Image: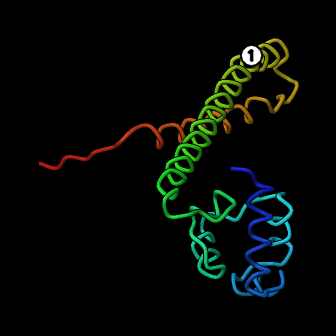
């Protein structure tokens, strides 16, 4: 998905309908700055707005994601391409999240011994504060990870 191509397509469709950026924004209950960002390719419409945007502009979501009008004979092929591309983006985002988890794990593994060493050898220093931060981040990551990957079932007798 090419954001600039999508933005130009949104601008063309808006102009075909005779709307200004402000009028389109009012129909979608957003700011005209958001419409401007879409049309310049700086951002894409939020998923929650896509159906309404397509309805207002008289296009399909597939056409919006492709950034062009689609003939009926090419529609199925374009839909499949868009689905594959969206799935690829989702996989990349998941991989990035996993990398972030590993980075935080490495930081935690490195900082915990430092924290304990400082507090063990100099107990009157009032603490470094690192322990509290590590504990908080660790709890947040553990709870998030647990909720994402484990299913809790309660069986009543």
Judge from the rendering whether residue 28 lies leftward or rightward of residue 12; answer left or right. left
Residue 99 % position (x, y): 66, 27
Residue 28 % position (x, y): 69, 81
Q: Nearer the viewer, residue 55 or 34?
A: 55
Q: Residue at 58% of width from left, 43% of height from top? A: 90
Q: Residue at 69% of width from left, 18% of height from top? A: 109
Helix, strand, or loop for circle 1? helix
**In the rendered image, the vertical position of residue 82 relative to residue 11, given as above or below:** above
Task: Estimate how packed mark 1 is, as few (under 14), some (14 to 19) or many (20 or more) residues with alpha carbons within 10 Å.
Answer: few
The answer to which image quadrant residue 97 occupies is top right
**In the rendered image, the vertical position of residue 100 relative to residue 33, given as above or below:** above
Q: Nearer the viewer, residue 67 or 33?
A: 67
Q: Nearer the viewer, residue 58 or 23?
A: 58
Q: Residue at 78% of width from left, 73% of height from top? A: 12
Residue 138 % position (x, y): 63, 33
The answer to which image quadrant residue 124 occupies is top right
Q: Residue furthest left?
A: 157
Residue 38 % position (x, y): 79, 65
User: Which residue has dot 1 on it?
Assistant: 110
Judge from the rendering whether residue 138 lies leftward or rightward of residue 8; answer left or right. left
Q: Nearer the viewer, residue 121 or 100?
A: 100
């Amino acid at each position: 998905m090419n954001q600039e191509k999508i933005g130009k397509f949104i601008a063309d469709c808006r102009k075909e309908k005779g709307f200004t950026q402000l009028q389109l924004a009012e129909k979608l209950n957003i700011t005209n700055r958001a419409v401007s960002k879409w049309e310049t390719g700086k951002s894409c419409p939020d998923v929650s707005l896509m159906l309404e945007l397509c309805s207002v502009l008289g296009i399909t979501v597939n056409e919006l994601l492709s950034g062009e009008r689609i003939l009926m004979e090419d529609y199925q092929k374009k839909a499949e391409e868009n689905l594959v591309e969206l799935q690829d983006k989702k996989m990349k985002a998941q991989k990035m999240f996993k990398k972030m988890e590993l980075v935080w794990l490495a930081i935690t593994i490195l900082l915990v011994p430092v924290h304990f060493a400082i507090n063990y050898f100099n107990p009157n220093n009032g603490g470094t504060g690192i322990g509290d931060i590590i504990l908080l981040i660790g709890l947040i990551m553990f709870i998030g990870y647990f909720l994402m990957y484990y299913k809790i079932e309660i069986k009543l007798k």
